[in-house]
Image: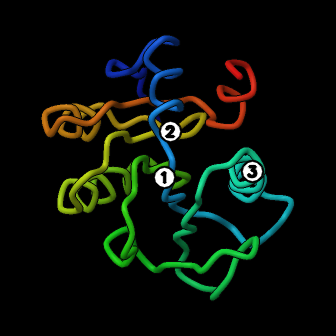
Amino acid sequence: MECEFPLVNSNKEEIKAIFEQTKAIALIGCSPDETKASNKVAKYLIDHGFTVYPVYPKENEILGQKVYRSLTDIPHQVDMVDIFRKPAVIASVIDEAIAKDGIKCIWTQLGLVNNAAASKAQQHGMKVVQNHCTKIEHNQLF
């Protein structure tokens, strides 16, 4: 698989503003396995005051939070969608985000880039951060 270079991305000042404006995060691909990065990031975000809605195909609860099967199943306001899924899946997640009102930011984790999907998110008024870790960036900025 060939990796894309992120052509659509936010800078450090924008990333800081995104965190300051974010309260609720849908974490797509949040694993129940405590050794996985998605679980560690979710725990960090919860520990730092964010509301995290885990999205995972199995499990009913992860880190004490109710698990949803898809982004559109979350009945609450979501500010950011944090994606831990393969680049090929990012486009469908962004389509779900566009269909759900109020999402301000699409964030793809380290190694995850889909420029076409990111451009589509931007065209729908969302900020985009690609190939960055929310835990690392938040820890460096705050």
In the rendered image, is residue 133 in sight? Answer: yes
**Three-letter amino acid code at disc 3?**
Ala
Q: Nearer the viewer, residue 26 or 142?
A: 142
Q: Element at badge 1?
A: loop
Alpha carbon separation for disc pair 3 and 2: 13 Å
Q: Earlier along the polypeptide chain: callout 1 or callout 3?
A: 3
Q: Nearer the viewer, residue 30 or 7?
A: 30
Q: Quadrant of residue 54?
A: bottom right
Q: Are marks 1 and 2 in contact (CB under 8 Å)?
A: yes
Q: Earlier along the polypeptide chain: callout 1 or callout 2?
A: 1
Q: Determine which residue is flagged by label 3.
A: 37
Q: Is residue 19 above or below residue 104?
A: above
Question: x, y (%) of residue 115?
Answer: 30, 31
Q: Earlier along the polypeptide chain: callout 3 or callout 2?
A: 3
What residue sits 67% from the left and 18% below the top? 141
Q: Quadrant of residue 42?
A: bottom right
**Three-letter amino acid code at disc 1?**
Lys
Question: x, y (%) of residue 99?
Answer: 18, 61
Q: Are marks 3 and 2 in contact (CB under 8 Å)?
A: no
Q: Element at badge 3?
A: helix
Q: Residues within 10 Å of mark 1 (few under 14, many from 20)?
A: some
Q: Nearer the viewer, residue 13 or 83?
A: 13
Q: Relative to residue 102, is residue 86 drawn left or right?
A: right
What residue sits 32% from the left and 41% below the top? 104
Which part of the image, by quadrant, shows the C terminus? top right
**Three-letter amino acid code at disc 2?**
Leu
What residue sits 74% from the left and 50% below the top? 37
Find residue 86 and name its label. Answer: 1
Alpha carbon separation for disc pair 1 and 3: 14 Å
Q: Determine which residue is flagged by label 2.
A: 112
Q: Is residue 117 above or below residue 129?
A: below
What residue sits 28% from the left and 56% below the top? 97
